[in-house]
Amino acid sequence: MGSIRWRYLGEDAIEISDISSNIHIQLGLRDYLKGFPKLGIASFMFTDKTLTLVSEKYGFMSVSHIIDRVAAYQHKVNENVRLPLRIIPICYDEAFALDQRKLEDICKLDYEEIIALHLNVEYTVAMFGFMPGFPYLNGLPLSLSIPRLKSPRKIIPKGSVGIANEMCGIYPNQTPGGWHIIGRSPLSLFDPSKNVMPLTLGQMVKFERISKKDFDGFTFN
Amino acid sequence: MDLPLIRIINSGNLSTLQAVCRFGFSDFGIPKSGFQDRISAHLANWLVGNKRFNTLIESYANYFEFEVINDCSMGVQGACSEIRINGQSVSLDQAHHLRVNDRIQLFNNTYGAILYLAMAGGFTATEVLGSTSTDIANGLGGLNGLPLASQDILKGSKFNMLRQARSIPEGLSSRGYFSKNVTVHVIAGPEDYLFTKEVIDNFYSHAFLLSAEISRVGYRLTGHPIHVDSYDIPSKTVLPGTIQIPPSGDPIILMADGPVTGGYPRMGVVAKVDQPILAQLRSGGRVRFLACLPEEARTREANQRQWIEELYHKKTER
């Protein structure tokens, strides 16, 4: 199949476009390619519909062998590897929902309607990026799909839950950032001293509303 | 066990402990970190008989000063124009034995930006996710994830003395490639299709000025804003060396602590072989880009790697 499009990203990495944006198909492709160690792939990054492969040594011996394998991959979703649903507590108190007004204006909904929409769906961890442990969650309802802030905020507090375009994300630490902030979670998303990260690629996520009082009493674990 | 080796008196600008990259966590959003100029870092480690990736100090200081707590052997490479031990100027390209209470001053008035200070046996640092390299933005590695500060005490191995002083062979000193004007090779893409041919020609035919916005995350260039029609692209993977074009048109080149994804169009990636040259450019310096094919970039990088490897294999000499 010569129809697969790819480009170099520097001399040591290639990027393959038009991959399925379904994270389960992506992870299936990753595991399939891992079965061919001679291809020399050191790392796999999926972003949207793109797969970035970084070589183990100094550039790939044969890009065409990799492309052939990608083309040969049958889009099978292995349902057995689905991970348990992860519940993420979130508080929508106005102290935390920094963009409450803006969200109401842009979405033309009142805040309780916005909260209901945000709570009502299951999200999928589609990728991590931007900063350590920042999950890009797929599945945001279209009526909440709004562009990023025109100018980024200088400080977004740790745990803030943001929305932008068709994604929801959680800021694991304080940072500047450009997403509209809908609420805050007390959950610790990145603790390098523990080897276990609380979220995994492909995992399903659902938000559960907590009060300000519960938030304040929540012990980070 | 570890011994306290030195107390920093003046840490200068942006000094951190660096070592091997933090590999294998990019899909969790963890930057690579590690040496920005691996050539100078490898040479500094070689001077004191270390392995290539032993933990050392990387510093943008124009002036760095410390005092010695326990006898140790020091190697300095990169952007350093003078070393003084207790006020006496000593040779730049050789290892030096330091004694308790010695006071060491390092000066930089070269065209280079970054100096490397290695101690025999390496410095002690916190290992996080497989690396001791400091990632300041995310508080990982090094000394509690922080940049080095005055009064910090750095520890190291008790095997911290060299039996014989080494010196860098003629012609290999890392200062040789520092310049006010540099040219670096770039592998084009992957988003170069978003730019018109005219804009791309412009990019490769003008020298850009390195602004004062310099960090281990990225270097911002100015002087020739680059126009892009559409910024409406989803976040994609970025690597150290990636040249991003933000809406201001002033290119940002991502460095060792750069993020793993970015939402700006990617004009190209600086070839690995030239990343040390770029890292060493000072603000106010100029950089030109030269398009090159991946194969060419790899050949040049292999040659660079080979002479470092040869140097390391000549263990018995000197």
Image (cartoon, coloured by chain):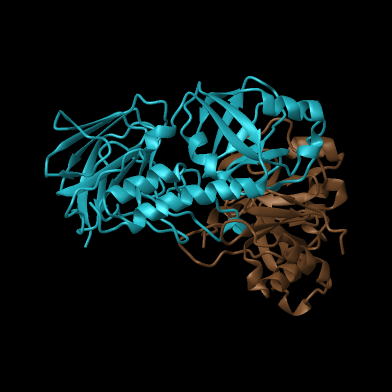
Visible residue check, residue A10? no
Q: Which residue is drawn at 38% across and 50% down?
A: B142
Q: Residue at x 79, y 25 (%)?
A: B198
Return the x and y of residue A137 as percentages of the image width and height. 73, 56
Visible residue check, residue B177? yes
Q: Residue at x 34, y 31 (%)?
A: B12
- The image shows residue B79, relative to residue B56, as above or below, that is above
Q: Residue at x 23, y 58 (%)?
A: B2
Return the x and y of residue A50 as percentages of the image width and height. 76, 54
| Colour cyan maps to chain | B
Return the x and y of residue B271 as percentages of the image width and height. 59, 43
| Colour brown maps to chain | A
Tell which residue pokes out farthest to the bottom in this image.
A80
In this view, the residue in front, B110 or B211, is: B110
**Direction from residue B316 to residue A120 in the image, left or right:** right
Give the image quarter of residue A147.
Answer: top right
In this view, the residue in front, A103 or A30, is: A30
Tell which residue pokes out farthest to the left in this image.
B100
- The image shows residue A120, relative to residue B88, as above or below, that is below
Return the x and y of residue A47 as percentages of the image width and height. 73, 54
In this figure, what is the number of numbered marks? 0
**Direction from residue A69 to residue B99 in the image, left or right:** left
Which corner quadrant holds the N terminus of chain A?
bottom right
Give the image quarter of residue A145.
Answer: top right
